[in-house]
Image (cartoon, rainbow, N blue to C red):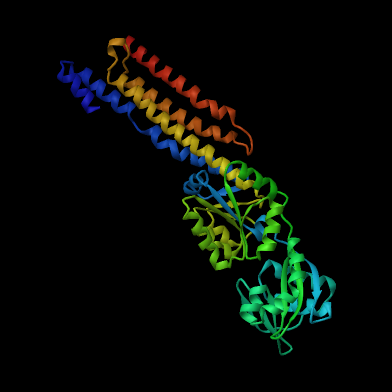
Amino acid sequence: AVGAGLAWYLTGAAAVFSLQIFIAVLVIACPCALGLATPTAIMVGTGKGAEHGVLIKGGEPLEMACKIGAIVFDKTGTLTKGKPELTDVVEIEMKDEEEIISIAASLEKLSEHPLAEAIVNHADEEGIAIQEVNDFRAIPGHGVEGKIAGKKYFLGNRKLITDIVGLSEVEIKKVERKMSKLEDAGKTVMLMADNEHILGMIAVADTIKESTVEAVKELQRRGLQVFMITGDNRRTAEAIAKQAGIKNVLAEVLPQDKAEEIKKLQGTGVKVAMVGDGINDAPALAQADLGIAMGSGTDVAMETGGVVIIKNDLRDVLTAIELSRETMSKIKQNMFFALLYNVIGIPIAARVFAGLGLVLRPELAGLAMAFSSISVVSNSLLLKRFKPGRRNYLSMIAPYLMTALFAFLFIEFGRLSGEM
């Protein structure tokens, strides 16, 4: 503005005339539209997300959602319903099925794992007694142990039996065929043992959510790599992944190692989102470029995630990504508008095109600047027409219409100023 005013004054223009140019350029260059470009779009975008059950905690998660190249789903409670049921009891050294359930339910009564709840609920439904347990210990990624009537029992996976109990691989091989058959059906098998033998097996199954297959298919169609991460053995994990349509499986991952697996994926140069619901998912949610927590999950998971899926529907992960892409597109459009007005308006206000009859008086420059702010806000408000899975055609064509309209207004204001 100073440069334009001085340039005219030094070339012989009157002081009042030069001052008008100074004011017109100063007014037209006001960064109102530039300042409104981002916050208005983010405000409307996050509000629209909340309307559809997707809580987005600010601009950073909203921006990151459109940059994601890989998405990792926890299995239990995220891909699956998180309400497993006891399906099979296999007698081995212990020949009393009811006793196997009683010991297993007694041990799992003190556990917080979703699979433990299934065993305890089954015992309650069948009226099987739950006994007192002493010296209980939960071993993350392995299982549980405790003493019942003075005798120590263990319940968990293969690693528990070999690494903690110390039984030989020979003991595992005795039951391997039966375990494999159950795991191929997508069931999680837990071995019950004492210090000498494997006493029995309990199988628990958790069905996938109705929305899982559709959500996974749509994410893959959009070019995202989809992974499933779980502590289950590979055979069970792959059976569940096959039902969900997921090809990339991270199996037998201990809770404390989930964040490390996310870090490995990030090391390939791809932006990673993690979707989980449990306490043990929190470190992975924090490590991921974008943490997405399920609304039915723990408070720790929801606090850690940048996005919270309130309705527990995996299709809302797609909604978050679609909304992010549309919102970021609006921000870029708004930034373009803000710069376009300056590119068109400043030369006219500086009377570069005075020879063509295009000038801009200060009062009309102020009106033009107000229109530029209105256009940015109006463009952002078109996000209110967003609907998951549908194209917002009005929002798509609006930038072209607005560009033509406001370019026309600037030129008309310039002509009007020239006639005044």
Please state the horizontal and vertical placement of residue 217, each as a whole percent of the image: 66, 45
Instruction: Note whether 329 is above or below 6 in the view shown.
Output: below
Q: Quadrant of the N terminus?
A: top left
Instruction: Note whether 365 is above or below 326 in the view shown.
Output: above
Q: 233 or 57, which is in the foreground?
A: 233
Q: 291 or 338, which is in the foreground?
A: 291
Please state the horizontal and vertical placement of residue 273, each as a whole percent of the image: 54, 52
Point 66% across, 71% down: residue: 112
* Residue 420 visible (yes or no): no
For this orientation, the residue located farthest to the bottom is 150
Q: Quadrant of the C terminus?
A: top left
Residue 21, picture quadrant: top left
Instruction: Note whether 65 is above or below 264 in the view shown.
Output: above
Q: Is residue 227 left or right of residue 87?
A: left
Residue 235, picture quadrant: bottom right
Q: 11 or 113, which is in the foreground?
A: 113
Residue 154, picture quadrant: bottom right
Q: 386 or 247, which is in the foreground?
A: 247
Please state the horizontal and vertical placement of residue 390, each as a whole percent of the image: 63, 34
Point 67% across, 82% down: residue: 167
Instruction: Note whether 95 is above or below 275 in the view shown.
Output: below
* Residue 30 visible (yes or no): yes
Q: Is residue 296 left or right of residue 19?
A: right
Q: How many marks?
A: 0
Please state the horizontal and vertical placement of residue 230, each as a whole percent of the image: 62, 62
Point 36% across, 20% down: residue: 364
